[in-house]
Amino acid sequence: MNHFTLKKHRGDVPSLLLLIVLVGFPQLSETILSPSLPSIGVAYDVMPRVAQTLMSVYFMAFALGVFVFGRWSDRIGRRPAMLIGLAIYALGNIVCWQSGTFSALLVGRSLQAFGASVGSIVTQTMLREAFTGTVRNVRFAQISAALAFTPALGPFIGGALHDIWSFRAVFLALVIGSVLLFAVTYNRLPETRTERKAPVALGPLIRRMSRDATLWRYAVLIGGWNGILFAYYTEAPFLFVTHFGLTPSTFGWLGIGVATATAGGAWASKRGHARHETPERLIQLGSAIVVCGALASYGAAALTGTGSFVAMCGALFLVLYGIGVALPNALAVALRAYQGEIGTAGALFSLVYYGIVSAIVYGMSVAHDGTPYAIARYFIAGSVVLYVVQHKVPSRE
């Protein structure tokens, strides 16, 4: 069997750069608000834990969106679904920009996330349609390496805009960016669905997936590692801005370390494939690294002054590096038994694991206590659970 086969389909092969942008802008939209969370709490007169719900509500709406757009992409095509989602995303950004109350901001944030979800679910479906075998694994690793910089760019851009103007500038930038992204996608994105098929029957597919214990474990792993990653962006501004005294823009520069960590992990994953390591082996390695980093973060929290800051940065680097190793491999292999109904299966699967992400991010806001121990304890608990779960995943090679 040729593992380097590129599937033939109508239209051109999607540009790797455009796919990176489309799968990455939801992450940028989520993290770009991170440095402004303390200021938003003050501006809208809400407690820090309430301000942090802007992060968890994002994933609640995102989870619903991945199901809706995954289903629509099977009915009307990948390209039309993508364009509809981008239009809703732009609308949500406008509502956020013009919001006068925290409730209105939550509504805009929900619309923003619902529309942005199209970039995740439809782009992953297009990747799985366009490539097979080892090439698919490599493409996921390549995109994951590039995506390491996307969530990291969010705080960098958001922090700079916040310091120049205010958090309102963040939403204005997203309005402008969403219009430009819609225009480029309209002109450049081909349709990858090779033929029009009748919509997949939901009932039998849900029953089949619900009985697939391995699939559930992958959902927990992918949702868990993403949850830890975005719990970092939820708690980190209060850790580094409020506790360690950084400015929002200086906090944004820490994104370089985040990007280096996750990109380095994805690069190590790619090198592992070159050495013919199995995805399961790389998932195991990445999971172990996450646990080590989480344990180190507790030690860092016990220190004081500059030592605590440096040690905490190093510990969180390990956590994010391990996620960079494990996550792309879990994403690449989770749905390989569902290729015949990949759009709907991907939508259902994403609905579950983004629901897990939302719960974990919300849990971080509940665990917030204003000390460095909150993030350390939370990451230790989550990483240990995920380490146990990944050992239960059998190989399907």
Image: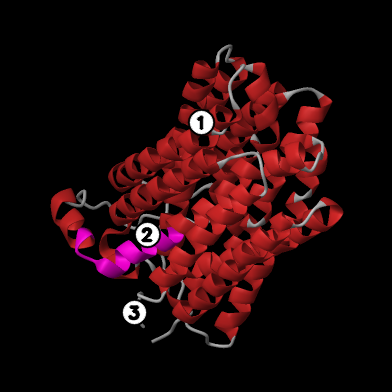
Left/right placement of residue 324 relative to residue 245 reads left
Asked if residue 352 is positioned above or below residue 264 in the image, the reply reads above
Mark whose residue sits in front, 3 or 1: 3
Splitting the image into 4 quarters, where does residue 162 fall? Answer: top right
Which residue is found at the position 83% from the left and 26% from the top? Answer: 164
Residue 9's mark?
A: none
What secondary structure is marked by label 2?
A: helix
The number of callouts visible is 3
As measured in the structure, the alpha-carbon distance from the residue carrying label 3 to the one carrying label 2 is: 14 Å
Query: Which colour style is shown?
Result: secondary structure
As measured in the structure, the alpha-carbon distance from the residue carrying label 1 to the one carrying label 2 is: 24 Å
What secondary structure is marked by label 1?
A: helix
- Callout 2: few (<14), some (14-19), or many (20+) C-alpha neighbours within 10 Å? many
Which residue is found at the position 57% from the left and 22% from the top? Answer: 96
- Callout 1: few (<14), some (14-19), or many (20+) C-alpha neighbours within 10 Å? many
Mark earlier in primary sequence (1, 2) = 1
Residue at numbered disc 2: 219
Asked if residue 351 is positioned above or below residue 104 in the image, the reply reads below
Residue range in magenta is: 210-222
Asked if residue 275 is positioned above or below residue 256 in the image, the reply reads below
Residue 112's mark?
A: 1
Residue 394's mark?
A: 3
Q: Is residue 49 magenta?
A: no
Mark whose residue sits in front, 1 or 2: 2
Which residue is found at the position 44% from the left and 55% from the top? Answer: 223
Q: Is residue 215 magenta?
A: yes
Mark earlier in primary sequence (3, 2) = 2
* Position in image of residue 22 (x %, y %): 55, 47
Q: Are marks 3 and 1 in contact (CB under 8 Å)?
A: no
Left/right placement of residue 253 relative to residue 98 reads right
The residue type indicated by label 3 comes to Pro
